[in-house]
Image (cartoon, rainbow, N blue to C red):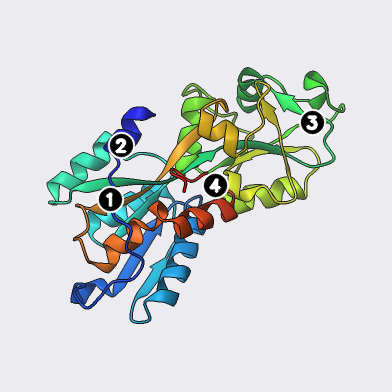
Amino acid sequence: MRTLLAIAIGLGLLLSVPGAALADDVKIVMDGSTTVGPIAKAFAEYYMSRNKGVNITVSESGSGNGAKSLINGTCHIANMSRFMKEKEFTAAASKGVMPVAHVVAMDGIAIVVHPSNPVQGLSVEQVRNIYLGKITSWKDVGGPDRKIVVVSRDTNSGTYETFEGLVMAKQRIVSSAEYVTSNEAARKRVSSTPTAIAYAGLGFLRDVKALKINGVIPDRSTVASGRYPVARPLFMFTNGYPKLGSYTHALITLHLTKKGQEIVEAIGFVPVTSY
């Protein structure tokens, strides 16, 4: 984790930019993670309210597609809930693209169930065994005698890849699992299904119950301290470091300002710095 944070770049506190901004910088396209999406949208809304001539669009096609968009030059900022893979850096280099990582927030991947589920917590091993299909009934982990409905993110998701690495130890999820395309879809499935289990970022915990994992509840303090075992940084990638004085530079460093931190926290994620 420290290695990832150490290579992330972000030094600037501008909220509005004078006329020195690049002419082609007034239209900024962001694409990628559905986890980072709410942060990107809130940043865009706030930033455009302060800079009337700037237009920022945000798409949520998944972390993998965000990386592809940056590499192919169809977006200026790739929102990603995981770090870029070696093969993505190789593909970028082949096209003259130099991805630079900006850590905009920290996140815990919460394991969520329906609020009526009496289970309060699981171990990482129990979660893994549920997703491997070795545990199939809630009664085996202290709940009712009902079959567990296993819900997973799609394989193009950065959240899926983080979960696969931190929880599944790269083992294949049971074939009967349902796959959904976003954190919000996972949340909705669990909130409407008393026997379901899923995983989602901290910003998507409405109408569901987050379980303690290894005895630790996912929240700001446990994620920031490193005590919650299923946590990760959230990234925005740019092609090179944005030019100082550009709108992109001001947008990509908004998370370092007091207002940016307030936005991150209001959405439910963990700021990387504090005032």
Q: Is residue 266 above or below residue 102?
A: below
Q: Position of residue 209 (x, y in %)?
A: 74, 40
Q: Is residue 82 above or below residue 167?
A: below
Earlier along the polypeptide chain: callout 4 or callout 2?
Answer: 2
Q: Secondary structure at mark 1?
A: loop
Q: Which residue is mark 4?
A: 269
Earlier along the polypeptide chain: callout 3 or callout 4?
Answer: 3
Residue at image position (68%, 22%) is 215
Q: Which mark is residue 11?
A: 1
Of residues 216 and 146, which is closer to you in this image?
216
Q: Are the residues flagged by discs 1 and 2 in contact, CB closer than 8 Å?
A: no
Q: Is residue 1 left or right of residue 160?
A: left
Q: Is residue 141 above or below residue 240?
A: above
Q: Residues within 10 Å of mark 4 (few under 14, many from 20)?
A: many
Earlier along the polypeptide chain: callout 4 or callout 1?
Answer: 1
Q: Position of residue 83 (x, y in %)?
A: 35, 39
Q: Which mark is residue 147?
A: 3
Looking at the image, is mark 3 or mark 4 nearer the viewer? Answer: 4
Looking at the image, is mark 3 or mark 2 nearer the viewer? Answer: 2
Q: What amino acid does circle 3 point to? A: Lys
Q: What amino acid does circle 2 point to? A: Lys
Of residues 121 and 86, which is closer to you in this image?
121
Residue 155 in sight from this viewpoint: no
Residue at image position (62%, 28%) is 131
Q: What amino acid does circle 1 point to? A: Leu
| Snapshot quadrant of residue 53 | bottom left
Q: Is residue 242 left or right of residue 144?
A: left
Q: CA distance from mark 1 to mark 3?
A: 50 Å
Q: Is residue 61 left or right of residue 251?
A: right
**Figure label count:** 4
Q: Secondary structure at mark 3?
A: loop
